[in-house]
Image (spheres, rainbow, N blue to C red):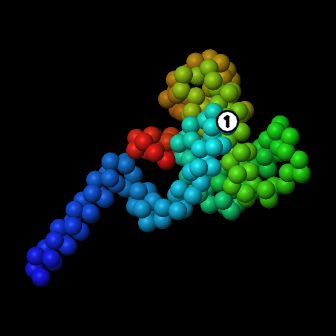
Amino acid sequence: MRFLLKLIICLGLATLAAFALLAWRSGDLIYTAYEWLSPARFHQFDNLIRSVAAEHQLDPMLVKALVWRESRFDPRKLGTAGERGLMQVSERAAREWAQETRVSNFQPEDLFDARTNLEAGTWYLARAFQHWQHQSEPAAFALAEYNAGASRAQRWAKNDPHAPMPQETFRGNIDFPGTRKYVQSVLHRYEFYRKRGSM
């Protein structure tokens, strides 16, 4: 009986040690704990994100990082300025997407559908990447545009998206604390996914 109890304790400690090691290596202990406690919530859109990201030639880990930042994977989230869904797409951006991609009968409520939201959001993000394709590290530029708009991102780039600018310089030029924090948190989450090698 004592042997069995010791074995159970050893197995329990080994399991805790393994979890602690994995959580520590992931770079984000709290996120990893949430993910283990509620895996369905954190992975339910992975296949859809991969599919839509591939259509727009974006890294699915970056798209997932943006979804994490925008909605924490809540497809019904409604933002303070009317942004909707997983990627918190604004009605204006969604109408541009619908017009450009010839989506007929688009309604803002359609953005609560995960696929529609991801299609519109990744289209908008991919367009931002195209604006900054001349930068060696365009992610920060594109994310700033996604969050604050093209005109502000261009101002932070000194009004020339084609002139090379180090990412750190650009991030230092962002004078909206919310956007600076937004870019930093999405890039941090993106690095977290890349470091562990999976979404």
Residue that protrudes farthest toward the top in the picture: 163
> Looking at the rendering, which quadrant does residue 173 occupy?
top right
Name the spot of residue 160 as percent of width and height, x first.
67, 20
Name the spot of residue 85 as percent of width and height, x first.
69, 56
Along the horizontal axis of the image, is 129 left or right of 12?
Answer: right
Name the spot of residue 182 as percent of width and height, x first.
56, 45
Nearer to us in this view, 47 or 13: 47
Q: What residue sits 54% from the left and 62% below the top?
A: 41
> Looking at the rendering, which quadrant does residue 58 occupy?
top right
Give the crowd class for mark 1: few <14, some 14-19, many >=20 residues within 10 Å.
some
Q: Which residue is mark 1?
A: 56
Residue type at the position of mark 1: His
Q: In this picture, is 25 found above or below 30? A: above
Nearer to us in this view, 97 or 5: 5
Along the horizontal axis of the image, is 121 left or right of 143?
Answer: right
Name the spot of residue 26 as percent of width and height, x first.
37, 49
